[in-house]
Image (cartoon, rainbow, N blue to C red):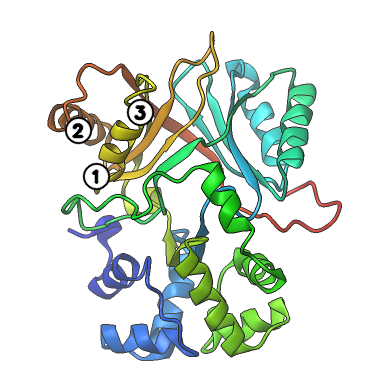
């Protein structure tokens, strides 16, 4: 059975078009032809899936630390204050994800901004306002980050990134290749493509470009690796994958790249990246995300991964999510003075 009892056309739409979205003036017409539907039917289906929360947007996923800076942060909130602390965190437009997870550090959130300095300011402000100093865990290397998700179940392992582990130094080299048009386009697509027959023309109006320039510009960002993918961004929980575990690993530093690449190549690991240890409170340096229909399915898959990849000797801990306080796409291009969501 398809996730959330999706009709066949909805399943194919969401499963097949999470990446390689058509870079043509009328992309929804291309989807319609593939599905045997009319263009307006595809647009109506996507509008409904957005309204139901199963889709967040049709847009791009960008490589971290190219357009700006981001970090994963966590605080240990007293249970009786957890909702209030989460509300403070959610109040920042720079916060795009905020989850309660099963750990002493129970609120995990992502801060994204145009500069490393602004990210630091947000963390400092949250610390002052809540009395809880966040762990600051910026990405050191990524082994798989594109947020794509096989709704039909795990398939064959995917290949590692062609350029190996992505690191901030690599991101800086990409950043140097961007021009003003690239940045204007990346800012304009943060809110996603419109559900109209010519969405790239709408995007062009927002970016101050023409339609052909937008299509060529997105192709360039994908070719450079600045954009990891262009397509439909789904929400796992609303599609029936209700168990979400951030599995954290304590890996000897000499092995972390090897282990990260192994985990990142597995089809049901949706994210895998290296972050710093923060002794004495935080010992883990490798993070991987595993989703499943229920808790037992995630734990069974984690056990299988440890056996199949010969990782049984490495301490790890699954931090299951309990509550989602906030989830949306990253926003690097905030308006001047904008600090609230």
Q: Is residue 37 left or right of residue 310?
A: right
User: In the rendering, at what x and y percent does residue 230 appear?
Assistant: 45, 68
Residue found at x 35% / y 82%: 31
Tag 2 secondary structure: helix
Badge 2, how many Cα within 10 Å: few under 14, some, many 20+? some
Instruction: Kindly identify which residue carries mark 2.
Output: 305
The correct choice, above or below, for 305 with respect to 329 in the image is: above
User: How far apart in space, not on screen, are marks 1 and 2 (Cα)?
Assistant: 9 Å
Q: Residue at x 79, y 23 (%)?
A: 128
Q: Which residue carries the number 1 mark?
A: 266
Which residue appears at 68% of the width and 74% of the height?
Answer: 181
Answer yes or no: is residue 121 visible.
yes
Identify the mark nearer the N-term, 1 or 2: 1
Pick the front one: 22 or 238: 22
Mark 1 falls on what kind of element?
loop
Expressed as whole percent of the image width and height from the top left, the position of residue 209 reads: 69, 83
Give the number of the disc on residue 256: 3
Mark 1 crowd level (few <14, some 14–19, many ≥20, 10 Å Cα):
many
Checking the image for residue 8, the label placed there is: none
Instruction: Judge depth for marks 3 and 1 and give the one in front.
Output: 3
Residue placed furthest toward the top: 280
Residue 33 location in percent, x, y?
Answer: 30, 89
Q: Residue most toward the right?
A: 337
Q: Quadrant of residue 188?
A: bottom right
Task: Between label 3 and label 2, give the one nearer the viewer.
Answer: 3
């Amino acid at each position: 059975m398809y996730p959330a009892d999706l009709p066949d056309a909805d399943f194919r739409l969401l499963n097949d078009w999470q990446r390689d979205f058509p870079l043509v003036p009328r992309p929804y017409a291309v989807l319609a032809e593939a599905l045997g539907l009319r263009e307006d039917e595809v647009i109506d289906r996507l509008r409904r899936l957005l309204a139901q929360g199963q889709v967040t947007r049709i847009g791009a996923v960008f490589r971290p630390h190219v357009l700006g800076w981001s970090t994963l942060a966590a605080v240990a909130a007293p249970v009786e204050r957890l909702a209030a602390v989460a509300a403070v965190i959610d109040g920042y437009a720079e916060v795009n994800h905020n989850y309660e997870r099963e750990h002493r550090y129970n609120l995990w959130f992502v801060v994204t901004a145009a500069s490393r300095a602004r990210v630091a300011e947000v963390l400092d402000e949250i610390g002052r306002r809540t009395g809880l100093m966040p762990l600051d865990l910026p990405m050191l290397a990524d082994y798989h980050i594109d947020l794509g998700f096989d709704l039909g179940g795990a398939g064959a392992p995917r290949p590692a990134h062609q350029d190996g582990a992505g690191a901030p130094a690599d991101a800086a080299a990409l950043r140097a290749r961007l021009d003003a048009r690239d940045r204007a386009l990346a800012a304009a697509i943060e809110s996603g493509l419109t559900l109209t027959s010519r969405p790239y023309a709408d995007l062009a109006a927002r970016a101050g470009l023409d339609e052909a320039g937008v299509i060529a510009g997105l192709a360039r960002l994908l070719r450079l690796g600045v954009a990891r993918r262009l397509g439909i961004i789904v929400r796992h929980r609303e599609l029936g994958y209700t168990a979400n575990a951030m599995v954290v690993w304590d890996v000897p530093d000499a092995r972390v790249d090897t282990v990260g690449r192994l985990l990142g190549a597995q089809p049901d690991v949706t994210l895998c990246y290296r972050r710093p240890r923060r002794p004495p409170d935080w010992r883990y340096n490798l993070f991987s995300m595993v989703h499943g229909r229920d808790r037992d399915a995630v734990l069974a898959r984690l056990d299988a991964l440890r056996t199949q990849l010969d990782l049984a000797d490495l301490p790890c801990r699954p931090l299951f999510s309990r509550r989602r306080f906030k989830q949306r796409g990253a926003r690097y291009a905030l308006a001047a003075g904008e600090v609230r969501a």
